[in-house]
Amino acid sequence: MSTTDTAVQAKQPLPAGTSAKPKPSLPARIAAKAGGGVVSVFLILVALFWMMPTIGLLISSLRGSSDIAASGWWEVFTKPAQLTTENYSELLSNDIITNSLWSTVMITVPSTVLVVVIGSLAGYAFAWMDFPGRDWWFMLVVGLLVVPVQVALIPVSELFGEIGIFETTFGVVMFHVAFGLPFAIFLLRNFFAEIPRELLEAARLDGAGEIRLFTRVVMPLGGPAIASLGIFQFLWVWNDMLVALIFADSDSPPITVALQQQVRQFGNNIDVLAPGAFLSMIIPLAVFFLFQRQFVSGVMAGAVK
């Protein structure tokens, strides 16, 4: 049979009653039609279940101490008159809590900014700059990822005590920066290494130096990864209690330590603890939801080419 005859047969229509693709089974068709709605309902239920502790904490922070002691937070749906903002008024008049919130901001913001800036510069250097021992230095950075925080508490405490930064905000910031940099460098180096070399070479041919190349080309392309790193670092520092409990100033502790001290001193003052805990929780939640698009883009970066 000639090639022409084969081509003519290939173009002929299929016999009646046949199709190019096998017909899906009845269960497959039912799943395809109902899949979208079922999946959506399932995801909504999972989201509500995941948010249940936050919702309960919010409602508890809006109830009086007597109502909290008498019944669970779900009773507010049948007795909405229990809701009040008096707890938040008392919270804002509590100098310990308000000062701790300010201390938390003074620790979290510099720790996040320094890790992002230094990690970006180091990640670019490890990805695109040649210097002696570059691979060995990067292996050392990767090795630091496995060092637990607990191992460094005692030696770093002694070191900070000798140089005079123990129980200071600066000392807490330095500790968080030191332990946040290995992950930051590892993450950003791998992301920056995926940038096409031709793009960087074209910028160099146009006369761009390393600083201009970093600020005008690499940083805009690395926005999703940098945003993801910033969210990770912010959440870790804001919610930290171990490092703050050891290195922070006892007169102006972060919010996590302040709430722990309130529990230790006044174990039944849930009317202060609930709004304080919710306030400390809602700020990182707001940061996450504001930058969730960049976070998802940064997490998926490099998954496909």
Image: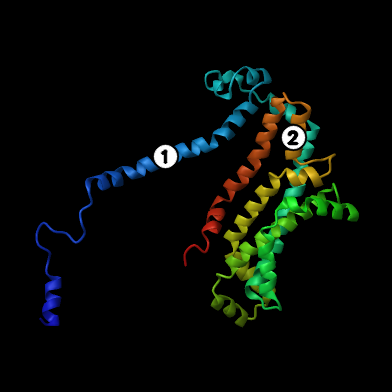
Q: At 67% across and 49% down in the image, what residue appears?
A: 236
- On residue 147, the disc is none
Kind of element beneath mark 2: helix
Question: 21 or 140: which is nearer to us?
Answer: 140
Q: Which residue is mark 1?
A: 42
Q: Earlier in the sequence, mark 1 or mark 2?
A: 1
Q: Which residue is mark 2?
A: 260
Q: Judge whether residue 110 can be spotted in this image.
A: no
How far across and down, in percent of the image, does residue 72 sit? Answer: 58, 22
How far across and down, in percent of the image, does residue 222 sit? Answer: 59, 64
Q: Is residue 45 left or right of residue 291?
A: left
Q: At 79% across and 41% down in the image, what residue appears?
A: 253
Q: Is residue 74 above or below residue 147?
A: above
Q: CA distance from mark 1 to mark 2?
A: 36 Å
In the picture, residue 279 is in which quadrant?
Answer: top right
In the picture, residue 7 is in which quadrant?
Answer: bottom left
Q: At 77% across and 30% down in the image, what residue appears?
A: 264
